[in-house]
């Protein structure tokens, strides 16, 4: 999983590592499963930074208030073969006459921001009074994240995991067709291309039905099956796990052997490439989780998301970055868990959201803390699209939120339910308990003062604040 | 058939079973269900976000503040009662003495006026008018004094309330609190501009602690810096005066005078504007603060001072004395800042004696060095 030793000592790599050790460059990992709001977060973050000098939206981002910030500019990204993150398109969609959320990401893209500021450091103040910090951010489909755990699994181990997951509802019923097909096809016999294609098509259908809104499952591997990106239709994607690995001998052209070979080449050519090119080293990480969606769907979606996240977070390297870290490889030394869409709950529920998230990801957080990483939990909204309000209802004052639902034209006001602090037991996830609905982005007259948000400035301060 | 032991398995209704220990694990199913409000329910929002309307001016915003954030926090009873129970006999004595004096005064005046009226109607009227004007002037004076005292008390009240807000992770109560703090500065043009920025920045998603931090950062910070500079200046003055003054008694008087002056200045800066009674109360509270300061704080401070003073040994004994009283003044000043700031300091923004001491010693050193150079030249 690590980069080759030689690659680490190539001149360009050493140069980059020195820059990063000297706080001149930060690679920010924006991690989140699909539909957790990565693109909106990145867009909003870029927008806030680009307008940081003349906005009053970032009171808790100290650099913007200290008067030391000279300006922020989007620069040419370092990897020219990667598409650029289309900030202009996303922001145009958000700020259009009828605002819309950006389209779900289907491929990888990258952006580099140069933050120019007056240095406060006693050493750099004299050497170079104006310093520049380059922030590299990568946007990618959240589905692909789930490929990272595959790097450590053999085909047999992975198949066993999938087979076990298919023993439980709702996967049990959703996978019925694929399982039936797999059970009637002998694994140790040679197999035709058509059968292979059919098996993988059935498996892909199963994954898509898991992904459907009413089930909302996220632990769907391999990630490219549900978001093919540039690999659409490639034979590399024509395989699937098996239910029971054959115990006896099998020939090299048997069904099992072919599937295993394709799995390995998927790992080698897709996952490993993705990992080493974009995910091998980060300095800071923010993990975005949409906990409100899980409340709506129920206990199964919650369990699924939790295990998916814990699995994914194992693939990152955490640890304190020291003075000589440029020699030994860089590690993530700050980790922020963020519950997104905090504006979809009433503002008094934000502490509950934070506490709930902390409980949910306690394992990963403890792992990171053990490595000496400073972690924090926060509820934030990249773009705030509701207003806090209070209503008199049946003789009581109820806090509520007001906004335009995604499917409607008129604003509604609702109290969407209390966010529990503790993880509810399975029976407690009742249908009528939560009603978190999706809202349209706000219509803004003037976007140059920065987009409205909740706590994005505090997230920025935590992620980048110590670099200035 | 009367059997004491039951053989066959039996199911009971769950509700009918009473657990022995009474500590049964229960799944708490209590929650507030979601509510979609009907359209005719009147809504109170505190921000125009979705509409294309022009931003309201901060003054309007303050006026249009929703009623629901105006709920007062119920403060727990403070331990003032303890001190009251200890002193009823003193109170009684003072009250009866005052009543005696007032009574004597009234009876005396009455007799005096009656005597004057008996001798001449004109003289009686004249004296009555005089007495009335004296009484009304005294009344106005004490009324004003009372008002100022009340404002000062209000600041202590605000401080207690602020402390509670900073400790809890609540929502919806800080806006009204901050607005009440802002009222103190409503007439101050230098703070007004910053208040306007604050009102534009703050939005409905901020929590109590965040609102307080924001207010402290955007509005109070400038005042804090001014107060800090004032303390530094006054303590430097005191240090220099004590250095050059030849008599020990004069030192004491000088230090006391500068300190009282500084406390009043700081109070005025933070908007407390105390009169005589108020400033006495303020001085008492500052001195109390000094006496009852955290032991750890004192240890850390005096350690720093001792270490710092060893460096000062290069100066004369009198210079060291001067710096000592300068540091005392600085300490009084910082305590006065804490006593007068309506919004209590958060832990990380509290001004430290260490910094002020460094600056004080540094600036005095500079004075000495420049003098030495002059003398040599």
Image (cartoon, rainbow, N blue to C red):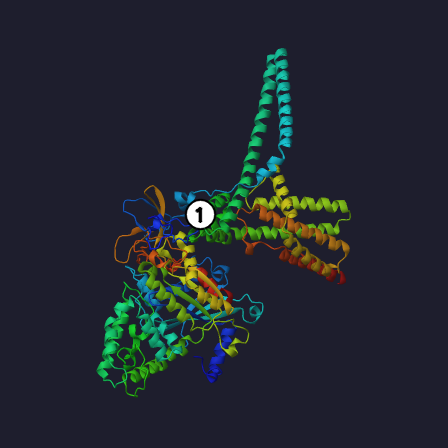
Residue extending furthest toward the left: A194
Q: Determine which quarter of the picture holds residue A237.
A: bottom left
Residue that mark 1 sits on: B175
SS assignment at label 1? helix
Q: Is residue B148 above or below residue B96?
A: below
Q: Position of residue B224 (x, y in %)?
A: 56, 51
- Determine the residue positioned at 77% across, 55% down: B317
Quadrant into which the C terminus of chain B falls = bottom right
Binning the other alpha carbons within 10 Å of mark 1 as few (below 14), some (14 to 19) or many (20 upward) gives many
Q: Residue at x 57, y 51 (%)?
A: B226
Displayed quadrant of residue B9? bottom left
Q: Is residue A468 visible?
A: no
- Residue B72 can be seen in this image: yes
Q: Is residue A302 left or right of residue A68?
A: left
Q: Chain of mark 1?
A: B
Q: Position of residue A176 (x, y in %)?
A: 24, 71
Nearest to the observer: residue A282 or residue B74: B74
Q: Is B136 positioned to the left or the right of A95 in the image?
A: right
Q: Position of residue A235 (x, y in %)?
A: 27, 82
Residue A385: x percent and y percent? Answer: 34, 56
Residue B367 is left or right of residue B202, and the answer is: right
Count of marks overlaid on the render: 1
Outermost residue, front side: B1
Q: Is A20 or A259 nearer to us in this picture?
A: A259
Residue at coordinates 35% horizontally, 79% vertically from top-left? A156
Q: Is residue A450 above or below residue A391?
A: below
Depth order, front residue of B6/B371: B6
The front one of A387 and B265 is A387
Residue B285 sits above or below residue B346 on the image: above
Q: Residue furthest bottom?
A: A252
Q: Is residue A153 above or below residue B59?
A: below
């Amino acid at each position: 999983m690590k980069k080759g030793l030689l690659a680490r000592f190539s001149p360009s790599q050493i140069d980059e590592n020195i820059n990063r050790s000297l706080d001149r460059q930060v690679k920010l990992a924006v991690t989140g499963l699909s539909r957790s709001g990565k693109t909106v977060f990145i867009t909003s973050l870029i927008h806030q930074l680009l307008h940081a000098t003349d906005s009053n939206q970032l009171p808790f981002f100290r650099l913007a208030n200290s008067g030391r910030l000279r300006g922020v500019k989007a620069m040419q990204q370092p990897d020219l073969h990667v598409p650029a993150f289309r900030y202009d398109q996303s922001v145009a969609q958000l700020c259009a006459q009828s605002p819309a959320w950006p389209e779900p990401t289907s491929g990888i893209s990258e952006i580099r921001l140069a933050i120019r500021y007056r240095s406060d450091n006693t050493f750099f103040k004299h050497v170079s009074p104006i310093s520049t910090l380059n922030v590299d951010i990568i946007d990618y489909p959240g589905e692909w994240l789930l490929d990272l755990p595959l790097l450590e699994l053999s085909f047999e181990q992975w198949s066993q995991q999938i087979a076990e997951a298919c023993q439980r509802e709702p996967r049990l019923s959703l996978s019925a067709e694929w399982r039936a097909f797999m059970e009637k096809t002998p694994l140790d016999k040679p197999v035709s291309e058509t059968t292979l294609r059919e098996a993988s098509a059935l498996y892909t259908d199963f994954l898509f039905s898991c992904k459907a809104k009413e089930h909302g499952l996220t632990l769907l591997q391999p990630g490219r099956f549900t978001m093919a990106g540039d690999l659409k239709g490639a034979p590399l994607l024509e395989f699937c796990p098996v239910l029971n690995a054959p115990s006896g001998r099998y020939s090299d052209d048997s069904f099992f052997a072919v599937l295993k070979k394709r799995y390995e080449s998927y790992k080698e050519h897709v996952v490993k490439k993705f990992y080493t090119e974009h995910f091998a080293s980060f300095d800071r990480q923010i993990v975005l989780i949409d906990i409100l969606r899980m409340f709506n769907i129920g206990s199964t979606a919650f369990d699924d998301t939790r295990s998916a996240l814990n699995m994914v977070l194992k693939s990152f390297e955490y640890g304190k970055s020291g003075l000589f870290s440029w020699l030994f490889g860089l590690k993530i030394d700050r980790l922020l868990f963020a519950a997104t869409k905090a504006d979809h709950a009433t503002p008094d529920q934000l502490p509950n959201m934070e506490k709930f998230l902390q409980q949910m990801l306690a394992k990963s957080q403890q792992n990171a803390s053990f490595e000496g990483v400073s972690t924090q939990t926060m509820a934030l909204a990249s773009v705030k699209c509701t207003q806090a309000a209070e209503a008199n209802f049946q003789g009581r004052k109820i806090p509520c939120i007001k906004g335009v639902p995604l499917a409607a034209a008129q604003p509604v006001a609702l109290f969407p339910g209390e966010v529990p602090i503790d993880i509810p037991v399975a029976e407690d996830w009742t249908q009528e308990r939560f009603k978190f609905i999706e809202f349209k982005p706000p219509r803004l007259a003037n976007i140059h003062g920065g987009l409205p948000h909740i706590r994005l400035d505090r997230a920025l301060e935590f992620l980048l604040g110590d670099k200035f | 058939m009367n059997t004491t032991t039951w053989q066959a398995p039996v199911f009971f209704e769950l509700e009918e079973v009473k657990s022995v220990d009474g500590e049964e694990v229960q799944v708490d199913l209590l929650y507030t269900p979601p509510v979609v409000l009907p359209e005719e329910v009147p809504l109170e929002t505190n921000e125009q976000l979705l509409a294309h309307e022009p931003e309201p001016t901060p003054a309007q915003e303050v006026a249009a503040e929703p009623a629901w954030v105006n709920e007062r926090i119920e403060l727990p009873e403070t331990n003032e009662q303890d001190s009251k129970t200890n002193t009823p006999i003193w109170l009684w004595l003072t009250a009866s003495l005052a009543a005696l004096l007032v009574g004597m005064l009234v009876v005396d005046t009455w007799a005096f006026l009656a005597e004057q009226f008996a001798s001449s109607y004109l003289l009686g009227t004249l004296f009555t008018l005089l007495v009335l004007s004296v009484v009304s002037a005294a009344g106005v004076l004490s009324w004003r004094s009372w008002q100022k005292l009340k404002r000062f008390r209000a600041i202590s009240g605000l401080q207690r309330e602020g402390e509670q807000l900073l400790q809890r992770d609540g929502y919806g109560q800080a806006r009204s609190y901050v607005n009440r703090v802002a009222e103190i500065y409503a007439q101050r043009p230098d703070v007004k501009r910053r208040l306007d920025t604050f009102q534009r920045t703050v939005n409905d998603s901020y929590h109590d602690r965040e609102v307080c931090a924001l207010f402290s950062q955007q509005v109070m910070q400038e005042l804090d810096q001014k107060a800090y500079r004032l303390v530094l200046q006054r303590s430097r003055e005191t240090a220099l005066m004590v250095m050059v003054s030849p008599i020990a008694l004069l030192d004491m008087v000088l230090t006391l005078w500068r300190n009282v002056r500084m406390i009043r200045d700081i109070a005025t800066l933070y908007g407390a504007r105390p009169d005589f009674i108020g400033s006495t109360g303020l001085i008492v509270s500052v001195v109390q603060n000094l006496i009852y300061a955290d032991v750890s704080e004192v240890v850390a401070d005096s350690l720093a001072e001792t270490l710092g003073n060893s460096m000062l040994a290069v100066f004369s004994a009198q210079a060291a004395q001067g710096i000592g009283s300068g540091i005392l003044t600085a300490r009084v000043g910082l305590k006065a800042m804490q006593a007068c700031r309506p919004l209590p300091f958060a832990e990380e923004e509290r001004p430290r004696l260490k910094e002020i001491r460094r600056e004080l010693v540094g600036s005095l050193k500079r004075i000495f060095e420049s003098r030495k150079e002059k003398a040599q030249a």
